[in-house]
Amino acid sequence: MVYILPILAVIVSFLFVYIARPKNQESFKLLLAFSGAFLLALSFFELLPEVYSMLKPKSVAVFILVGILLQVFLEFFSKGAEHGHVHLDLNENRFPIVLFISLSLHALIEGVPLHRGDSIIYGILIHKIPVALILSVFLLNSNLKIGLSILFISLFAVMTPLGSFLAYESSFISKFSSELTAVTIGVFLHISTIVLFESAQDHAFNLRKLVVIVLGFIAGYFLY
């Protein structure tokens, strides 16, 4: 299930957008805000205590900062697709390789803590669904042929399970699983805080967004 659920989340999201062709994406943004809060809560309640029990505190801080910097670097190429914004213009009917590589690296990293099969999988799923929805809207509204869009979303769907598989099966990667988990926390912190503090209209939180953020924190607390 750890490998199947992330794939299903992306594929079902793409099919929903393809069939329903939603025009109002406000609900996507609210789901994204909930996912950011939920992922942040799980990072604090579950992942951080684990890595602090395995590594020296200063080492944890270093790897978390590496994760933050890595995500900042990836967003130079993805243009913020990991937190629901795609600011690319696909004028030519070519497979968006740069976007795919940056999103794939992000997905591989977030798959590292999944091999344990605990509650963090729900955080990843809730994070992937709104991102997959917004990414699907972008792909289907672009000049890409439908075949390339399906190829993109299919390859993207398998990256998180691939990261989890490598973390579990590779002796080299599993040897540094705590360090990689700390890097993943940095990635999660960067994405979550951007989603949470991203401006609404006039750079102010609206009530609905505030409510879903609080619900995300509460869900993360009780799930763990």
Image (tube, rainbow, N blue to C red):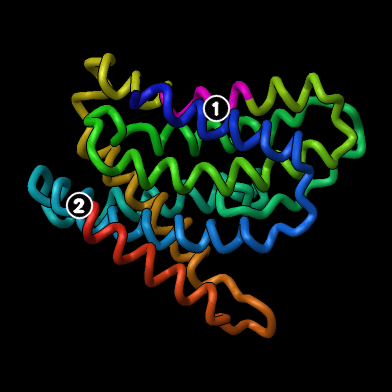
Q: Name the one closer to the observer, 206 or 76.
A: 206
**Above or below: residue 31 compared with residue 181:** below
Question: Which residues fall within the magenta stretch?
Answer: 154-161
Indicate the amino acid at tag 1: Ala
Q: Is residue 47 left or right of residue 203?
A: left
Label at residue 224: 2
Residue 27 is labelled as: none
In the displayed structure, would residue 124 be above or below residue 188?
A: above
User: Where does residue 209 sit, x and y in percent of width and height?
Assistant: 53, 73
Q: Is residue 224 above or below residue 211?
A: above
Q: Could you say where residue 20 lies in the image, as x and y percent from the top left? A: 75, 41
Q: Quadrant of the N terminus?
A: top left
Three-letter amino acid code of the residue under disc 2: Tyr
Measuring from the top left, give residue 38's x and y in whole percent. Answer: 37, 57
User: Which residue is located at x 41 percent, y 50 percent?
Assistant: 187
> Which badge, 2 or 1, is on the more N-terminal residue?
1
Residue 73 sits inside the magenta stretch: no
Q: Residues within 10 Å of mark 2 (few under 14, many from 20)?
A: few
Residue lying at 20% horizontally and 52% vertically, measured from the top left: 224
Q: Which residue is mark 1?
A: 157
